[in-house]
Each structure stands twice: as structure tokens, then as C-alpha cells.
Amino acid sequence: MSRTLALGARRIGYEIRAYFRQGDAVFFGFLFPIVMLTIFAVAFSEAEFGRDADGNVVSAAVFYLPAMLAAGVLLSGLQNMALDIATEKSDGTLKRLAGSPLPVISYFMGKIGQVLVSGILQAILLLVIAAVAFGVDLPDSPERWLTFVWVFLLGIATSAILGIGLSGIPRSGKSASAVIIPIVLVLQFISGVYLQFSMLPDWLQNVASVFPLKWMAQGMRSAFLPDELKVLEQGETWNLPGIAIVLAIWLIVGLVLARLSFRWIRKDS
Amino acid sequence: MTQHTGHAVSVRGLRKQYGSFAAVDGVDFEIVRGETFALLGPNGAGKSTTIEILEGYRDRTSGEVSVLGVDPQKGGLAWKARLGIVLQDSGESGNVTVREQLSHFAALYPNPRGVEETIAAVGLEAKAGTLIRRLSGGQRRRVDVALGMIGRPELLFLDEPTTGFDPQARRQFWSVIRSLKDDGTTILLTTHYLDEAAQLSDRVGIIAGGTLLDIGTVDQIGGADARVPVVRWLEHGVLHEERTTEPGRLTHELVARLGEPEGLEVIRPSLEDVYLQLVGSHEVLA
């Protein structure tokens, strides 16, 4: 077991190094939410997204920060993981590893570690840019930061595990982005990332509530938006227990899916 | 299954069926420890299927297989640590340097070879700090070979290892393989270069249509008949050719009759000639 953990730690370093050296994934997975936050903050700089208890305007940057944090979790976790593993399956990386004495657990430790590290860096970058460039006041209560931390960790774990499960669907590395990116994109549109969730029709809100991203975005809003804005949520509450339950269910679904679908190689292909 | 201590690989009645098509149709062979064995055959003959069954990548339909005393279908991590595998193709994104990749793989094995020593053995010292994706095809292939040997394997699989090598790189590769052999490594090689097989292997097996046509040492395979030398000469501008077990005597007669014969050649069939003859006659039958 100690060998598995030591090799897992080595894999994390190896994966992070390789991740930041590939230009396209760094842009589409890592920098994308930051670019989008900038665009929204600039494009809607005159718009008003509500008011807090003191009557201060909620700006676009404030409003979109939690949405982009949630999008980042989904992109760093699910999209990055699913595309990465699908590519490694088709380009021979997994085949080579399958012939080496690397434990599967160490391989996944490396992947999840890479997702976690890039996800954390991405979140920090988003928070810093929001605060410095767009003057967003970050929360000052420890409870809100605690909410952010658990929503982030549970969200990224769920996304990463679901990404492993989804990596088995594309038949080739080339078709992987065509399969995975539409799923991620549609989820972002219906889950209150790009469009205000409260403006979506009830039936669409209900559909989105089945999937984890809506809950991650809601959790992020509860951490970063003034409490007055919770009237815009379903049931006019942040519903933190609901967030925890839905994400935990998806985490378990992801684990089962990953366990059933992951193979080092497609035998007899 | 009985364990043959003298055998690194033992294959009995191996079959691999895809639907109604038998990719491997009853193959038997053994590889002695320390031996270099080449499996030769045209594309689609069943070479790669056989080698991938031995490596544990594919499950067999029937037959008995033992690799280092273990059934590859049940081989665990400790078994994999004793193997070195150079696959036929690799197309990894290669966002790590040669040195990083080798150090990383070295850490997976209990008793690895030195990283710099291995880089030098495949002649990539000048490229050690280069990202693998920036290397040429032949250089990437050398990284594959280096990764295959980094764990000091007892048994090394080389599936068409020198595709894309220039002649000099191929010679250098041969000397690497000879030094591995001197260290006692058992090697299973497939190649389309018959001179390579003749240079490196102790024994060769020729496979076509999923069956083994012949197996033996490089200078015995194909049987005595296939080894009969050919004498060629020009007589009044016409090419003559005669197969004879006594080329010296024929040459002597020619000299007596014609003086110094024009364009005289005594040709001993190479492994390539024997191979083409065997595979060709198989295709005629099939």
C-alpha cells in the first residue's frame, strides 16, 4: 500500500507538469472561466443583478464570480478528466502503463491530484482577479469560506469521478471532445452558469436540478452572494443540505460508473 | 500448470478466435531463458496477437501459455515488474522530457537501470532534456526501447522495434540488444527486417495464417533443401543458374570448361530467401 501511495504522489507531480505544458487544455479547461468572468464583468458593467441589505448594487462581476467558480470545478474536474483519459486510452499511454507495474490506484491518484491542484489554482486566480480587477468584495465570514471550501471539494471530487466514468463513452480520442464538450456546455447553460438560473422556466430548472452543476453553482452563490439574493433560488433557500445530498449521490454514481467502465485498454479491439 | 524452470516462455496449442476467424490457430513454441527468439511473418500473420497474449494484453481462446512461470491472464504487478514491453506503436502526447519520462518509469520498478546510462545506451544523450513530442519518429522509438529496458526485465518483448531507424541507429540498437542478451535477458523480437532477425536471434519462428510454418536456428530454418547454394554465371552473355550442394566442384568444372567464368557468384540463401520461400509456398497452399 505504501508503494501505491508513493507512486501516486509521483504521478501527481508528473501529471501536473505534463498538464501545464499542453497549451490547448490549459486554455479551454483552466483559463476559460477566467476569460468568461472578464467578458461578463466588462459586457454587463452597467447592469444590476440585485441589491444587498444596505442597498448596494450587485454587479456583474459579483454575480458571475460564483457561476464561474462552479464552471471551473466542472471543467477542471469532469471535462479535463474525461478528455484526458479518453485521449490516453487511444494514444497508447494507458496501454504502456498497463504493461508496467503501476497500480491503477496510483494512476488515479495522479489524475485526481492534478485535477485538484489545477482546480485550486484556477479558483484562486478567479478570486484574485475578481477582487483586484473588478473590485468584488470577498466574503469576510468564516462560515461562507467554509461553505465555499466544502462545495468546492465535494464538487471537484464528484466532477473528477464522473469524468472517469464518462471517459469510457467516446470510442476514440479524436471523438472525445465531440462527445464530452456538448454535455458540459449544455449543463452550463441550463444550470445557471451563463444564464441567470432564476430566469429559466420552472420545468428547465427542474431538469437542471437532476444534474450536479446546478447544485455546485447554487453552493457557490450561497458563499459569495448577499443573503438577500436567496429569494431567487428554488424554494427561496440556499438549501445547503440538498446540495450536499445531490453531490454525494452523483459522487457514488460516478464511483460505480468508473469501477464498471474503466479498463487500462480495450481488450480484443 | 507445470512450471518449466528452463523456459522463459512456453506456448502450447495457442488459439485466438475472433468470431469465426482464427487469428492464431494452434501455435506451439518455447523460449529458453537467455535466448533471443524472433517471430517472423507477414502482416496479419498472428505475430502481434501472439505477442500481446504473452504480454497479458489479450486473452486467449484456448491453449496453455506460461510466461516466466505465470499465466499472463493472471499476471499481477510483481509479474509485470519482470517484463519489459516495447509495443508496436506509441503515439503519446509526450509533454515530458526524455529524462523525466525515464526517471518516472524507473521509479515503477524495484531494481531499475540508471536513467543516464539507459539514455546513453539508446544514444539520446543530446536529447535528454527535450520534450518527447519534439523528437523525430526514430528518436521516439528509441525512447520506447529505453522504457522497455529501464526496469532490468528478465524478459523483453520487442514488437518491430527499429521501424523508422536509419541504418546507423539500427546498428547501434543491435549492439544495445546484444549487451542486454549478454546480461542474460531473454528477448522475444518481431521484425520485418530479416537481416535484423539473422543478426540478433538464436532461433526464429516463421508464422503465417496463424500457424507456425517452421522454427529453428537461423542457419537451419527451412531445412537442408532450402539451404542449397546457388551458383550463377554468364555463358555467351546468357545467365545460368544451378542449385548444388557442391558449389566448389561446379565452379571447378566451369573454370576447366570456360576459363575464368564471367559474373560468377555462389549464393547461400539468406534468412530472407528462406523466409520468402516458406511464406510464399504457404500462400500458394492457402
Image (spheres, rainbow, N blue to C red):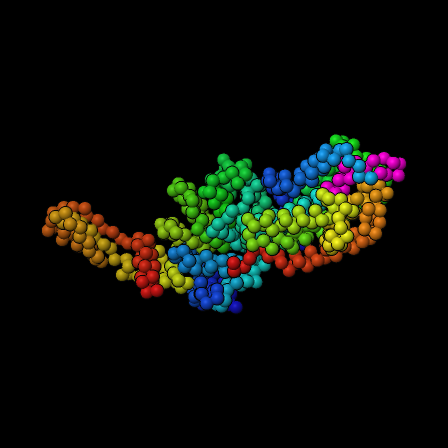
Residue in front for this viewpoint, A253 or A206: A206
Give the residue drawn at x 48%, y 53%: B157
Position of B58 relative to A184 (above/below):
below
Give the residue drawn at x 68%, y 37%: A35
Q: Residue furthest front?
A: A201
Position of A77 relative to B63 (above/below):
above
Range shown magenta = A51-70
Look at the image and tell me whether residue B108 can be seen.
no
Q: Residue furthest left?
A: B257
Looking at the rendered structure, the number of numbered marks drawn on it comes to 0
Please tell me in which quadrant of the rendered image residue A252 appears. bottom right
Residue B239 percent coordinates (x, y): 17, 50
Residue A92 percent coordinates (x, y): 53, 50
Q: Is B153 left or right of A24, judged from the image as shown?
A: left
Q: Is B196 left or right of B142, judged from the image as shown?
A: left
Give the residue drawn at x 54%, y 36%: B129
Q: Is B24 contained in the magenta span?
A: no
Residue B79 percent coordinates (x, y): 56, 57
Q: Residue furthest right?
A: A54
Give the residue drawn at x 80%, y 39%: A49
Look at the image and tell me whether residue B245 can be seen.
yes
Q: Is A225 left or right of B148, judged from the image as shown?
A: right
Residue in front for this viewpoint, B123 or A13: A13
Position of A68 relative to B25 (above/below):
above
Residue B213 percent coordinates (x, y): 36, 63
Q: Is A64 contained in the magenta span?
A: yes
